[in-house]
Amino acid sequence: MINKKTLTLLLVFVLLISGCASNKEEVKEEVKVVVEEVKGAAGEALDEAKEVSGEAVDKVEEMATDVVEEVKEVTSEVKDALTKESGRSVEKYEDIKLSAQEAYEIFEKKYPEIKIDKIQLDWDDNQYVYEVKGFDKDNWFELDIHPLSGEILKDKSGTRNDKYEKVQLTIEQVKKVKAIVDKVLEENAGATLDEWTLKYDNGRTEVEVEIDLPGGKDMEYTYDVDTGELLEIDD
């Protein structure tokens, strides 16, 4: 950008040419002086621009460094929290934070082309864990998922050797499980959940809810997950 000093010098230059055209040698000398002045003013302007730009770059770099450090700190805190959650055993049903549909979505993200045919909240080694199973034409897949952090604890797969029919579960069916499980627990005072299983069986999608009652007795309720109909009670 041309500053005021440069504009003034240029104006003087124009006036010299118009007013001193009769003395060419004098004009030449004056032109040289003006050119040098213009060069000097341009140089000063360039130095100022470099200084301002340098300060701006330094400021941006400083801000970027601060942001990176903050991101690292937050990321570290999140990782620490997840590690802490993953290390916790979940011994009470009410302590579970990860929903069944979230476990479903974790499997889908891991295996987007695989159909899910079974989800189970299992009681294993004195703690709850989600087991999500899927299939394609030739293989089976299974993830064990922590019910607090959503961490994948086990990732297994193999070749299918079964011949029975497999039907894909929908996210809408998975979302209905919690209400059925809660209903069973509410209707049985003092009961604790052993496990629940959602799968296709007997020509329909069923959810089996196994509970432990005070005194050591256990019971199993089977519901049609689509209709909510109670199909069977096994004690």
Image (cartoon, grey):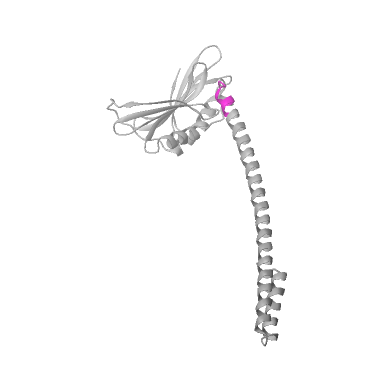
Callout count: 0
Query: Does the magenta-highlighted stretch encompass residue 87?
Result: yes
Q: Quadrant of residue 120?
A: top left
Query: Does the magenta-highlighted stretch encompass residue 126?
Result: no
Image location of residue 36, percent across then percent down: 67, 69
Residue nearer the viewer, 16 or 213:
16
Image location of residue 162, percent across then percent down: 29, 26
Q: Quadrant of residue 73?
A: top right
Residue nearer the viewer, 209 or 90:
90
Residue nearer the viewer, 189 or 123:
123
Hey, which residue is sitting farthest front in the picture?
A: 25
Image location of residue 16, percent across then percent down: 69, 81
Image location of residue 208, percent across then percent down: 44, 25
Residue at left offset 47%, top offset 34%: 106
Magenta stretch bounds: 82-89
Hey, which residue is sitting farthest top in the picture?
A: 215
Residue at left offset 63%, top offset 46%: 61
Screen quadrant of the C terminus: top left
Residue 33 visible in rendering: yes
Hey, which residue is sitting farthest bottom in the picture?
A: 22
Screen quadrant of the N terminus: bottom right
The answer to whether 46 is drawn above or below residue 65 in the figure is below
* Secondary structure, magenta segment, majority class: helix
Residue 208 visible in rendering: no
Residue nearer the viewer, 165 or 89:
89
The answer to whether 206 is drawn above or below residue 9 in the figure is above
The answer to whether 67 is drawn above or below residue 159 in the figure is below
